[in-house]
Image: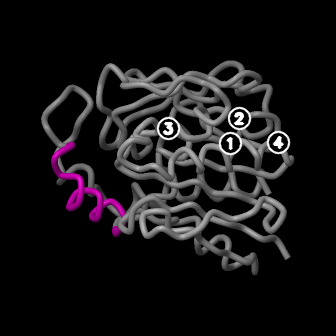
Amino acid sequence: MMRVHCLQHVAFEGLGGIEPWLTERGYRLSCSRLYAGEPLPKPDDFDWLIVIGGPMGANDEDVYPWLAAEKTLISQWIDAGKRVLGLGLGAQLIAASLGAMVCKNEQREIGWFPIERTAEAMAHPLGRLFPPRSVVFQWHGDTFALPVGAVRLASSEACRNQAFAIGDQVLALQFHLHMTPAGAAQLVEQCDADLKPGPFVQAAERILGTPEDFQRINALLVELLHAFA
């Protein structure tokens, strides 16, 4: 049985569309709620690590001291040859754990915006699954540099590094393919201060969108999870 462990940073941001996919396959799922002080797992106890999002930054160790231990754990997990999937903040934490810079992006990117598949993605089994252009759910103000050995899979007008992979072991997505209508509503409620007007910031009404928006990104997520597994 595949053993999957999730690192959760805030109560209002969870696995979204990933959880039913795991459950349907009978995978064993557990979680460390870092915001509640729960302990980190040992890499030997699990096969997959999923690092999900949150409103803090990857460098905010002075406010969230557990971020330092979390980044150490992620690097240990990768060194052990285990699969690691990062989403939003999780992607930034993977990059930071591998020695890449995480910093403020020039623009906040919040809402539904297009990403473009990169040329180098076509040579990667996960990258080939991305359409040439797709509109995805974004909610970030930071960005990451690519770690050594990473392949850039996608870019956007507002943010050059939207996704990367390292072999078939590590997948990091700045955008949120797992997002559901309920999850987006929670973000709008809990992080409304992020919605200050900007060239790549949409109004709450557009962000909540239509069910078809979420169904479409969840379908792409399922394709990636099948390939990643």
Residue 78: assigned label: none
Position of 125 with respect to 207 (left or right) is right
Q: Is residue 30 left or right of residue 179?
A: right
Q: Is residue 57 left or right of residue 5?
A: left
Instruction: Give me the disc on residue 134.
Output: 3
Residue count near mark 4 (Cα–Cα under 10 Å), binned few <14, some 14–19, many ≥20: few
Q: What mark, if any, has residue 165 been given in the picture?
A: 2
Report the span colored magenta: 182-194
User: Does the segment drawn in magenta span residue 49?
Assistant: no
The type of residue carrying mark 4 is Asp
Task: Give the labeled residue for mark 4.
Answer: 79
Q: How far separated are the C-alphas under marks 4 and 3? A: 32 Å
* Residue name at image x 77 percent, y 23 percent: 149
Residue at (62% x, 23% y) in the render: 146
Residue contact between numbered discs 1 and 2, judged by CB atoms under 8 Å: yes
Element under label 2? strand
Q: CA distance from mark 1 to mark 2?
A: 5 Å
Decide: marks 2, 3 in contact (CB < 8 A)? no
Task: Give the residue pinned by disc 1.
Answer: 171
**Considering only order in the chain, which callout, 3 or 2, is on the residue closer to the N terminus?**
3
* Residue 210 locus on image (x, y percent): 31, 60
